[in-house]
Amino acid sequence: MAVTVEQLAEEMYEMIKEAMGKKSFKATDLAKAMIAKYGEAEVSKDDCKHAIRVLIDTGRCVYSYFGGSYITLPHKEGAAPD
Amino acid sequence: MADEGVKTTLLDELEKGPWPSFVKEIKKASETSPVCDDLLGQLELSYEEKKGHWKHGGIVGVMGYGGGVIGRYSDVPEKFPNVAHFHTLRVNHPAGWFYTSDALRTLCNIWERHGSGLTNMHGSTGDIIFLGTKTDELEPTFADLTKAGFDLGGSGSVMRTPSCCVGQARCEWACYDTMKLCYELTQTYQDELHRPAFPYKYKFKCAGCPNDCVASIARSDCSIIGTWKDDIQQDDAAVAEYAALGLDIQKDVCDNCPTKCMAWDGKKLTIDNHECVRCMHCINVMPKALRPGKERGATILIGAKAPIIQGALLSSVLIPFVPADELLETLKELTGRIWEFWSEYGKNRERVGELIQRVGMANFLDAIGLEPTPEMVAAPRDNPYIFFQKEDGKPKDGDGQ
Ligand code: HEM
Ligand code: HEM
Ligand code: SF4
Ligand code: SF4
């Protein structure tokens, strides 16, 4: 049985949470990490795409832009005035 | 700032002269929009100090979207509180930029309710640009836009809002239906437009003929430029009429043909169509006498970009001719393979044109499964890695040295 989309979403979420403030991930970084972990037979690029969609559509993660598009936890923007 | 408008000594210079002035327009808008004085005030400060005062925010969209909003904050909000937040929205424009006046009013009303009321029709991406609003107004603006049938456009590492020339809607030279293709690309790639998953931006622009009114060859990663395969349609009586009316056909038409494939003996114009490179020059000069051929379609090109991280690139030919009715299917097939390769091997913020330069066109073609053809080479000996054999006309790989 292949890895479920929910499980992938959960693992991606943990990856993002742990690296928050240190490193940011793009969609392809997350997908590559999951495929490296489980192998192409278990996890497809499409599964990863769906997992990211789950994270974004539930609002657990958001897209941000710092010179490129990254997936992060919702946060108060550094540039925003108080 | 002062009550009755701001002091804009330097900016006022930009109101002089006969041309339109954004300073004049923003001052006019300040009668109804409170942000305008602060906007001009901050810009005047930038002109005085020769220093920008906008900070780039990380905000990129509304719930679920990874593009369409460009976050901007003032770094001097205490001086200009009305522009403390000044986010831009990109709104997906209709193909060919056609609106009813009702649609324009709807857009303006939405923006006066939720933002500065200032727009830029249109930005260089093609989108309708809404300039300046607060974070809290993003979702309400989006809700009103979608209710009116509009959607946000692209920003960040996504497929950007595709754009096209007016094509067959107004132009007799269009070799395919640019508006239809642009609309279909937009619909096909909704995911790629709203959910950033690429190394960097990717743009499609559809031009109906080689005049390329959307400058696709300079501004889009994938340029689709209309062309024809058969002979230029020629009306000899109309050619004679141009001559009779004083057009110097030798000097202004034949001598300017880049391949010198036209001859004029004073009575009859002869075109050696095999040597014609479809530049449109002669057709532009004599639109009543000459027009594109009947076998129409488009050339698909790859790799243009403006200079941001590296220098500017023009796009190069990928497929010399695709018949008009096969364009969408061909593009879908090809784009899937290009995106696959670029996503796998492209570095962060590397446009597809730069990737091709880095790995070489021959490797790129191999990866996306296309055979090299002579039309891809801009000039003889342009690429030492692709060799052509005389016997069968088929290319074989060079050994590189
Ligand atoms: C009288 C002596 C020579 C003459 C007249 C000559 C002439 C030429 C010409 C006309 C070209 C074609 C340039 C092009 O197509 O762009 C060429 C290419 C070349 N020649 Fe020579 N050559 C001579 C000697 C040599 C020698 C002694 C070597 C090496 C030891 C050499 C190595 C090359 C190489 C590597 C190329 C490039 C081939 C390519 O572009 O695919 N040549 N030569
Ligand atoms: C470590 C040694 C070498 C390196 C790294 C090297 C690298 C290169 C590179 C990058 C090119 C350019 C290819 C292009 O046009 O994009 C080139 C071309 C060329 N190299 Fe070398 N090369 C080396 C040694 C040599 C030697 C020893 C010779 C001759 C005895 C040579 C002859 C040539 C020739 C003739 C060309 C031009 C090929 C053409 O334009 O058709 N190279 N080399
Ligand atoms: S690019 Fe060609 S078809 Fe399109 S509007 Fe311009 S001249 Fe007409
Ligand atoms: S379209 Fe351009 S290349 Fe072709 S015949 Fe006319 S001027 Fe010459």
Image (cartoon, rainbow, N blue to C red):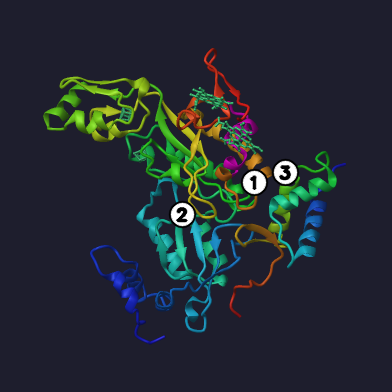
Between residues B17 and B131, which one lies in front from this camera angle? B17
| Circle 2 crowding by C-alpha within 10 Å: few under 14, some 14–19, many from 20 | many
In the image, residue B294 sits, relative to residue B213, either above or below, namely above
| Circle 1 crowding by C-alpha within 10 Å: few under 14, some 14–19, many from 20 | many
Asked which secondary structure carries label 3, the reply is helix
- Residue B4 location, x and y as percent? 34, 85
In the image, residue B325 sits, relative to residue A75, either above or below, namely above
Q: CA distance from mark 2 to mark 3?
A: 29 Å
| Residue at the right extreme, as displayed | A1
Q: Which residue is located at x 25 percent, y 28 percent? A: B254
**Which of the 4 quarters of the picture holds residue B102?**
bottom left
| Circle 3 crowding by C-alpha within 10 Å: few under 14, some 14–19, many from 20 | few
Residue B176 visible = no
Q: Are marks 2 and 3 on the same chain?
A: no
In the picture, the disc for residue B346 is: 1
Magenta part of the chain: B355-372
Which amino acid, by three-letter code, is at mark 2? Asp
Between residues B238 and B112, which one lies in front from this camera angle? B238
Disc nearer the start of the sequence (1/2): 2
Q: Which residue is mark 3?
A: A46
**Which of the 4 quarters of the picture holds residue B135?**
bottom right
Which tag is nearer the camera, tag 1 or tag 3?
A: 1
| Residue at the top extreme, as displayed | B391
